[in-house]
Amino acid sequence: MSSIYEKYGLKQVINASGRMTILGVSTPAADVVDTVKYGLNHYFEIKDLVNKTGAYIASLLGCEDAVVVSCASAGIAQSVAAVIVKDDDWLLENLHAAPLVVPHDIVVPKGHNVNFGAPVGTMVAMGGGRLVEAGYANECSADQLSAAVTPQTAAILYIKSHHCVQKSHLSVEQAAVVARKHGVPLIVDAAAEEDLQCYYQYGADLVIYSGAKAIEGPTSGLVMGRKQHVEWVKRQSMGIGRAMKVGKEGILGLTQAIENYLVQEKVSGAQMVEKMTPFIDNLNSLNGISARVVWDAAGRDIARAEIHFDEAVIGHTTGDVVQALKTGEIAIYFRGYKANEGIVEVDVRSVTADQLNTIFVCIKALLSGEKNA
Protein backbone atom coordinates (compact mmCIF):
# COMPACT_ATOMS: atom_id res chain seq x y z
CA MET A 1 0.00 0.00 0.00
CA SER A 2 1.43 3.38 -1.00
CA SER A 3 1.98 5.85 1.78
CA ILE A 4 -1.13 7.83 2.71
CA TYR A 5 1.18 10.81 3.25
CA GLU A 6 2.46 10.54 -0.33
CA LYS A 7 -0.92 9.80 -1.88
CA TYR A 8 -2.54 12.96 -0.55
CA GLY A 9 0.57 15.12 -0.25
CA LEU A 10 0.39 15.21 3.55
CA LYS A 11 3.20 16.09 5.91
CA GLN A 12 4.71 13.77 8.48
CA VAL A 13 3.86 15.08 11.96
CA ILE A 14 5.71 14.94 15.26
CA ASN A 15 3.02 15.39 17.90
CA ALA A 16 4.70 17.02 20.89
CA SER A 17 1.48 18.76 21.93
CA GLY A 18 -0.31 15.81 23.53
CA ARG A 19 -3.69 14.24 22.76
CA MET A 20 -4.89 17.07 20.55
CA THR A 21 -7.87 16.98 18.19
CA ILE A 22 -6.08 19.05 15.52
CA LEU A 23 -3.53 16.23 15.06
CA GLY A 24 -5.90 13.25 15.30
CA VAL A 25 -5.69 12.83 19.09
CA SER A 26 -4.13 9.35 19.63
CA THR A 27 -3.17 6.04 18.04
CA PRO A 28 -5.29 3.10 19.28
CA ALA A 29 -3.83 -0.32 20.11
CA ALA A 30 -4.01 -3.21 17.62
CA ASP A 31 -6.90 -5.01 19.33
CA VAL A 32 -8.94 -1.79 19.35
CA VAL A 33 -8.26 -1.42 15.62
CA ASP A 34 -9.32 -5.06 15.12
CA THR A 35 -12.53 -4.43 17.06
CA VAL A 36 -13.28 -1.35 14.95
CA LYS A 37 -12.72 -3.45 11.80
CA TYR A 38 -15.07 -6.16 13.14
CA GLY A 39 -17.70 -3.53 13.84
CA LEU A 40 -17.39 -2.09 10.34
CA ASN A 41 -17.90 -5.51 8.76
CA HIS A 42 -20.96 -6.67 10.72
CA TYR A 43 -24.54 -5.56 11.30
CA PHE A 44 -26.18 -4.98 14.68
CA GLU A 45 -29.46 -3.79 16.10
CA ILE A 46 -28.04 -0.41 17.03
CA LYS A 47 -30.35 0.31 19.98
CA ASP A 48 -29.44 -3.09 21.44
CA LEU A 49 -25.75 -2.43 20.79
CA VAL A 50 -25.97 0.97 22.51
CA ASN A 51 -27.78 -0.43 25.55
CA LYS A 52 -25.65 -3.54 26.02
CA THR A 53 -22.26 -1.93 25.48
CA GLY A 54 -23.37 0.88 27.80
CA ALA A 55 -24.33 -1.61 30.50
CA TYR A 56 -21.02 -3.44 29.99
CA ILE A 57 -19.01 -0.22 30.32
CA ALA A 58 -21.03 0.74 33.41
CA SER A 59 -20.18 -2.60 35.01
CA LEU A 60 -16.47 -1.96 34.32
CA LEU A 61 -16.58 1.56 35.77
CA GLY A 62 -18.91 0.97 38.70
CA CYS A 63 -21.62 3.41 37.65
CA GLU A 64 -25.34 2.95 36.89
CA ASP A 65 -25.21 3.34 33.10
CA ALA A 66 -23.14 4.66 30.19
CA VAL A 67 -23.49 5.52 26.52
CA VAL A 68 -20.93 5.95 23.74
CA VAL A 69 -21.31 9.19 21.77
CA SER A 70 -19.39 10.67 18.83
CA CYS A 71 -17.00 12.84 20.88
CA ALA A 72 -16.78 14.71 24.18
CA SER A 73 -18.18 17.93 22.68
CA ALA A 74 -21.23 16.00 21.50
CA GLY A 75 -21.44 14.61 25.01
CA ILE A 76 -21.74 18.14 26.41
CA ALA A 77 -24.43 19.15 23.92
CA GLN A 78 -26.46 15.96 24.41
CA SER A 79 -26.10 16.04 28.20
CA VAL A 80 -27.37 19.61 28.30
CA ALA A 81 -30.28 18.69 26.04
CA ALA A 82 -30.95 15.61 28.19
CA VAL A 83 -31.42 17.56 31.43
CA ILE A 84 -33.62 20.14 29.68
CA VAL A 85 -35.80 17.80 27.58
CA LYS A 86 -35.91 14.84 30.00
CA ASP A 87 -38.93 12.69 28.96
CA ASP A 88 -40.79 15.43 27.06
CA ASP A 89 -41.55 13.95 23.61
CA TRP A 90 -42.62 17.27 22.05
CA LEU A 91 -39.53 19.08 23.31
CA LEU A 92 -37.29 16.28 22.07
CA GLU A 93 -38.34 17.08 18.51
CA ASN A 94 -38.77 20.84 18.93
CA LEU A 95 -35.89 21.88 21.18
CA HIS A 96 -34.98 24.93 19.09
CA ALA A 97 -38.40 25.60 17.58
CA ALA A 98 -39.63 28.11 20.16
CA PRO A 99 -38.35 29.92 23.28
CA LEU A 100 -38.00 27.43 26.12
CA VAL A 101 -40.33 27.78 29.07
CA VAL A 102 -38.80 24.89 31.02
CA PRO A 103 -35.65 25.47 33.11
CA HIS A 104 -32.71 25.70 30.71
CA ASP A 105 -30.01 27.76 32.44
CA ILE A 106 -26.68 25.94 32.71
CA VAL A 107 -24.53 27.39 35.50
CA VAL A 108 -20.77 27.19 34.97
CA PRO A 109 -17.92 28.72 37.01
CA LYS A 110 -16.73 31.77 35.04
CA GLY A 111 -13.16 30.43 34.88
CA HIS A 112 -14.53 27.28 33.19
CA ASN A 113 -16.14 29.17 30.31
CA VAL A 114 -13.27 28.34 27.97
CA ASN A 115 -12.50 27.64 24.35
CA PHE A 116 -11.04 24.12 24.07
CA GLY A 117 -10.89 24.35 20.26
CA ALA A 118 -14.52 25.50 20.24
CA PRO A 119 -16.38 27.43 22.95
CA VAL A 120 -18.06 25.58 25.81
CA GLY A 121 -20.97 27.97 25.35
CA THR A 122 -21.55 26.77 21.78
CA MET A 123 -22.03 23.20 23.00
CA VAL A 124 -24.42 24.42 25.71
CA ALA A 125 -26.42 26.42 23.15
CA MET A 126 -26.61 23.41 20.81
CA GLY A 127 -28.22 21.53 23.70
CA GLY A 128 -30.80 24.28 24.17
CA GLY A 129 -29.11 25.73 27.24
CA ARG A 130 -28.37 29.30 28.27
CA LEU A 131 -24.92 29.67 29.83
CA VAL A 132 -24.90 31.47 33.19
CA GLU A 133 -21.50 32.29 34.70
CA ALA A 134 -20.87 32.01 38.43
CA GLY A 135 -18.14 33.89 40.27
CA TYR A 136 -15.25 35.54 38.46
CA ALA A 137 -12.44 34.56 36.10
CA ASN A 138 -10.03 34.26 39.03
CA GLU A 139 -12.42 33.00 41.70
CA CYS A 140 -15.48 30.79 42.10
CA SER A 141 -16.34 29.44 45.53
CA ALA A 142 -19.12 27.04 46.46
CA ASP A 143 -21.15 29.99 47.76
CA GLN A 144 -20.67 31.92 44.50
CA LEU A 145 -21.74 28.88 42.48
CA SER A 146 -24.76 28.39 44.72
CA ALA A 147 -25.75 32.05 44.38
CA ALA A 148 -26.02 31.66 40.59
CA VAL A 149 -28.57 28.82 40.82
CA THR A 150 -32.22 29.84 40.34
CA PRO A 151 -35.51 28.04 39.58
CA GLN A 152 -34.53 28.38 35.89
CA THR A 153 -31.36 26.31 36.39
CA ALA A 154 -31.40 22.97 34.57
CA ALA A 155 -27.90 21.86 35.65
CA ILE A 156 -24.49 22.87 36.90
CA LEU A 157 -21.66 22.26 34.43
CA TYR A 158 -18.11 21.77 35.72
CA ILE A 159 -15.21 21.68 33.23
CA LYS A 160 -12.26 19.66 34.58
CA SER A 161 -9.45 20.73 32.27
CA HIS A 162 -6.03 22.33 32.05
CA HIS A 163 -7.73 24.97 29.87
CA CYS A 164 -9.64 26.27 32.89
CA VAL A 165 -8.60 28.68 35.61
CA GLN A 166 -7.33 26.55 38.50
CA LYS A 167 -6.80 29.43 40.93
CA SER A 168 -9.43 29.83 43.66
CA HIS A 169 -12.01 27.61 41.96
CA LEU A 170 -14.08 25.05 43.82
CA SER A 171 -13.56 21.30 43.42
CA VAL A 172 -15.89 18.78 41.76
CA GLU A 173 -16.82 17.47 45.23
CA GLN A 174 -17.84 20.97 46.34
CA ALA A 175 -19.84 21.49 43.15
CA ALA A 176 -21.66 18.20 43.81
CA VAL A 177 -22.67 19.43 47.27
CA VAL A 178 -24.10 22.63 45.72
CA ALA A 179 -25.98 20.62 43.09
CA ARG A 180 -27.53 18.33 45.75
CA LYS A 181 -28.49 21.33 47.89
CA HIS A 182 -30.47 22.83 45.00
CA GLY A 183 -31.76 19.54 43.58
CA VAL A 184 -30.18 20.06 40.15
CA PRO A 185 -27.91 17.64 38.25
CA LEU A 186 -24.15 18.10 38.02
CA ILE A 187 -22.54 17.52 34.61
CA VAL A 188 -18.75 17.15 34.60
CA ASP A 189 -16.81 17.50 31.36
CA ALA A 190 -13.65 15.48 32.03
CA ALA A 191 -12.69 15.07 28.36
CA ALA A 192 -8.94 14.53 28.75
CA GLU A 193 -8.91 13.25 32.34
CA GLU A 194 -7.38 9.89 33.18
CA ASP A 195 -9.53 8.73 36.10
CA LEU A 196 -12.73 7.21 34.70
CA GLN A 197 -14.42 6.73 38.06
CA CYS A 198 -13.63 9.48 40.56
CA TYR A 199 -15.94 12.25 39.31
CA TYR A 200 -18.97 9.98 39.37
CA GLN A 201 -17.92 8.86 42.84
CA TYR A 202 -17.62 12.52 43.88
CA GLY A 203 -21.32 12.95 43.10
CA ALA A 204 -21.64 13.94 39.42
CA ASP A 205 -24.81 12.78 37.66
CA LEU A 206 -23.21 12.76 34.20
CA VAL A 207 -19.49 12.60 33.40
CA ILE A 208 -18.17 13.10 29.89
CA TYR A 209 -14.86 11.76 28.52
CA SER A 210 -13.16 11.85 25.14
CA GLY A 211 -12.81 8.34 23.79
CA ALA A 212 -9.67 9.19 21.83
CA LYS A 213 -7.61 11.05 24.45
CA ALA A 214 -6.46 9.26 27.61
CA ILE A 215 -8.44 6.12 26.72
CA GLU A 216 -6.83 5.94 23.25
CA GLY A 217 -9.93 4.65 21.49
CA PRO A 218 -11.32 5.64 18.09
CA THR A 219 -12.93 9.03 17.56
CA SER A 220 -15.72 8.84 20.14
CA GLY A 221 -16.88 10.03 23.52
CA LEU A 222 -18.31 8.50 26.67
CA VAL A 223 -21.12 9.74 28.89
CA MET A 224 -21.41 7.79 32.13
CA GLY A 225 -23.39 8.32 35.29
CA ARG A 226 -26.81 7.83 36.83
CA LYS A 227 -29.28 5.64 34.96
CA GLN A 228 -32.09 8.17 34.57
CA HIS A 229 -29.74 10.86 33.29
CA VAL A 230 -27.99 8.51 30.85
CA GLU A 231 -31.39 7.36 29.56
CA TRP A 232 -32.22 11.01 28.83
CA VAL A 233 -28.93 11.30 26.91
CA LYS A 234 -29.77 8.18 24.89
CA ARG A 235 -33.15 9.72 23.95
CA GLN A 236 -31.29 12.54 22.22
CA SER A 237 -30.46 10.10 19.39
CA MET A 238 -33.96 11.04 18.20
CA GLY A 239 -33.25 14.74 18.71
CA ILE A 240 -30.04 16.75 18.36
CA GLY A 241 -27.98 13.58 18.80
CA ARG A 242 -28.97 12.43 15.32
CA ALA A 243 -26.66 15.09 13.87
CA MET A 244 -23.71 13.74 15.87
CA LYS A 245 -24.30 10.00 15.88
CA VAL A 246 -21.49 7.53 16.49
CA GLY A 247 -21.07 4.47 14.29
CA LYS A 248 -21.16 0.84 15.35
CA GLU A 249 -17.37 0.67 14.92
CA GLY A 250 -16.86 3.59 17.30
CA ILE A 251 -19.14 2.06 19.93
CA LEU A 252 -17.33 -1.29 19.85
CA GLY A 253 -13.87 0.23 19.53
CA LEU A 254 -14.30 2.50 22.55
CA THR A 255 -15.76 -0.32 24.64
CA GLN A 256 -12.66 -2.40 23.93
CA ALA A 257 -10.36 0.56 24.59
CA ILE A 258 -11.98 1.16 28.01
CA GLU A 259 -11.55 -2.50 28.91
CA ASN A 260 -7.85 -2.25 27.96
CA TYR A 261 -7.39 1.06 29.74
CA LEU A 262 -8.53 -0.28 33.09
CA VAL A 263 -5.97 -3.11 33.16
CA GLN A 264 -2.95 -1.76 31.29
CA GLU A 265 -0.02 -0.31 33.18
CA LYS A 266 0.07 3.47 32.82
CA VAL A 267 3.22 5.34 31.88
CA SER A 268 4.06 7.34 34.98
CA GLY A 269 5.19 10.94 35.15
CA ALA A 270 8.53 9.69 36.46
CA GLN A 271 8.99 7.56 33.33
CA MET A 272 8.19 10.60 31.20
CA VAL A 273 10.87 12.55 33.06
CA GLU A 274 13.38 9.80 32.35
CA LYS A 275 12.47 9.86 28.66
CA MET A 276 12.82 13.64 28.31
CA THR A 277 15.95 14.20 30.42
CA PRO A 278 18.50 13.76 27.56
CA PHE A 279 16.35 16.05 25.39
CA ILE A 280 16.28 18.73 28.11
CA ASP A 281 20.05 18.43 28.60
CA ASN A 282 20.60 18.90 24.85
CA LEU A 283 18.35 21.96 24.77
CA ASN A 284 20.15 23.52 27.72
CA SER A 285 23.39 23.36 25.70
CA LEU A 286 21.94 25.87 23.21
CA ASN A 287 22.51 29.58 23.68
CA GLY A 288 19.30 31.46 24.55
CA ILE A 289 17.31 28.40 25.61
CA SER A 290 16.55 27.03 29.05
CA ALA A 291 14.53 23.85 29.52
CA ARG A 292 13.12 22.08 32.56
CA VAL A 293 10.54 19.54 33.70
CA VAL A 294 7.07 20.87 34.53
CA TRP A 295 3.95 19.03 35.69
CA ASP A 296 0.42 19.12 34.34
CA ALA A 297 -1.52 22.18 35.50
CA ALA A 298 -4.72 20.19 36.09
CA GLY A 299 -2.98 17.79 38.50
CA ARG A 300 -2.61 14.73 36.26
CA ASP A 301 0.52 12.57 36.54
CA ILE A 302 1.93 14.01 33.31
CA ALA A 303 5.39 15.55 33.07
CA ARG A 304 6.35 17.80 30.18
CA ALA A 305 9.46 19.61 29.00
CA GLU A 306 9.10 23.37 29.25
CA ILE A 307 11.29 25.34 26.84
CA HIS A 308 11.94 29.02 27.51
CA PHE A 309 13.28 31.07 24.63
CA ASP A 310 15.28 34.22 25.42
CA GLU A 311 14.00 36.15 22.43
CA ALA A 312 16.65 38.88 22.71
CA VAL A 313 19.40 36.25 22.45
CA ILE A 314 17.93 33.97 19.77
CA GLY A 315 16.74 36.83 17.54
CA HIS A 316 13.29 35.31 16.97
CA THR A 317 9.97 35.62 18.75
CA THR A 318 8.69 32.40 20.30
CA GLY A 319 5.67 32.60 18.04
CA ASP A 320 7.99 32.68 15.01
CA VAL A 321 9.86 29.60 16.29
CA VAL A 322 6.59 27.71 16.83
CA GLN A 323 5.34 28.67 13.37
CA ALA A 324 8.63 27.76 11.66
CA LEU A 325 8.65 24.30 13.24
CA LYS A 326 5.00 23.71 12.23
CA THR A 327 5.75 24.65 8.63
CA GLY A 328 9.01 22.73 8.23
CA GLU A 329 9.43 19.62 6.13
CA ILE A 330 8.27 17.64 9.18
CA ALA A 331 5.46 19.45 11.01
CA ILE A 332 6.43 19.73 14.70
CA TYR A 333 3.64 20.75 17.06
CA PHE A 334 4.24 22.01 20.62
CA ARG A 335 1.84 23.05 23.35
CA GLY A 336 1.93 26.78 22.66
CA TYR A 337 -0.46 28.17 25.26
CA LYS A 338 2.31 30.30 26.82
CA ALA A 339 4.09 31.33 23.63
CA ASN A 340 3.28 34.96 24.46
CA GLU A 341 5.47 34.50 27.57
CA GLY A 342 8.35 32.99 25.57
CA ILE A 343 7.48 29.46 26.70
CA VAL A 344 6.35 26.27 24.94
CA GLU A 345 5.85 22.78 26.34
CA VAL A 346 6.71 19.40 24.85
CA ASP A 347 4.37 16.51 25.69
CA VAL A 348 6.43 13.33 25.29
CA ARG A 349 3.62 10.77 25.51
CA SER A 350 3.25 10.42 21.74
CA VAL A 351 6.87 11.12 20.84
CA THR A 352 9.73 8.61 20.45
CA ALA A 353 13.29 9.23 21.62
CA ASP A 354 14.34 9.59 17.97
CA GLN A 355 11.62 12.18 17.40
CA LEU A 356 12.75 14.13 20.47
CA ASN A 357 16.21 14.23 18.91
CA THR A 358 14.69 15.43 15.63
CA ILE A 359 12.95 18.25 17.50
CA PHE A 360 16.28 19.24 19.08
CA VAL A 361 18.07 19.14 15.73
CA CYS A 362 15.37 21.27 14.10
CA ILE A 363 15.44 23.86 16.91
CA LYS A 364 19.24 23.99 16.74
CA ALA A 365 19.16 24.40 12.96
CA LEU A 366 16.53 27.12 13.17
CA LEU A 367 18.50 29.12 15.72
CA SER A 368 21.68 28.83 13.66
CA GLY A 369 19.84 30.05 10.57
CA GLU A 370 19.77 26.74 8.74
CA LYS A 371 16.73 25.33 6.96
CA ASN A 372 14.37 23.30 9.16
CA ALA A 373 15.13 19.67 8.23
Image: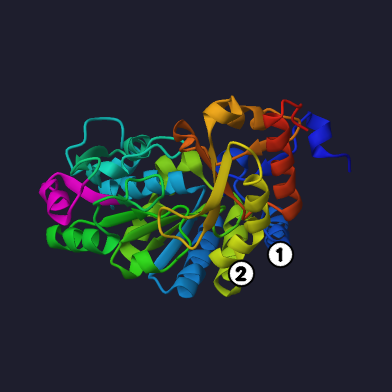
Count of residue discs: 2
Read off the residue under disc 1. 31
Mark 1 residue type: Asp
Q: The C terminus appears in which quarter of the rendering?
A: top right
The crowding category of the residue bearing disc 1, from other C-alpha atoms within 10 Å (few below 14, some 14 to 19, many at least 20), is few
Out of 23 and 132, give the one closest to the viewer: 23
Q: Position of residue 221 (x, y in %)?
A: 50, 52
Asked whether residue 235 appears in the rendered view, the answer is: yes
Q: Residue at (89%, 43%) from the top-left corner?
A: 1
Q: Check disc 1 and report its element: helix, strand or loop.
A: helix
The picture quadrant where one finds residue 248 is: bottom right
Q: Does the magenta stretch include residue 205?
A: no
Magenta range? 139-157
The crowding category of the residue bearing disc 2, from other C-alpha atoms within 10 Å (few below 14, some 14 to 19, many at least 20), is some
Q: Residue at (24%, 43%) from the top-left corner?
A: 138
Read off the residue under disc 2. 260
* Label 1 – label 2 distance at C-alpha: 9 Å
Q: Is residue 145 magenta?
A: yes
Out of 94 and 201, give the one closest to the viewer: 201
Circles 1 and 2, Cβ within 8 Å, touching? The answer is yes
Q: Residue at (68%, 56%) from the top-left corner?
A: 278
Q: Earlier in the sequence, mark 1 or mark 2?
A: 1
- Image height of 18 relative to 271, above or below: above
Q: Position of residue 201 (x, y in %)?
A: 33, 70
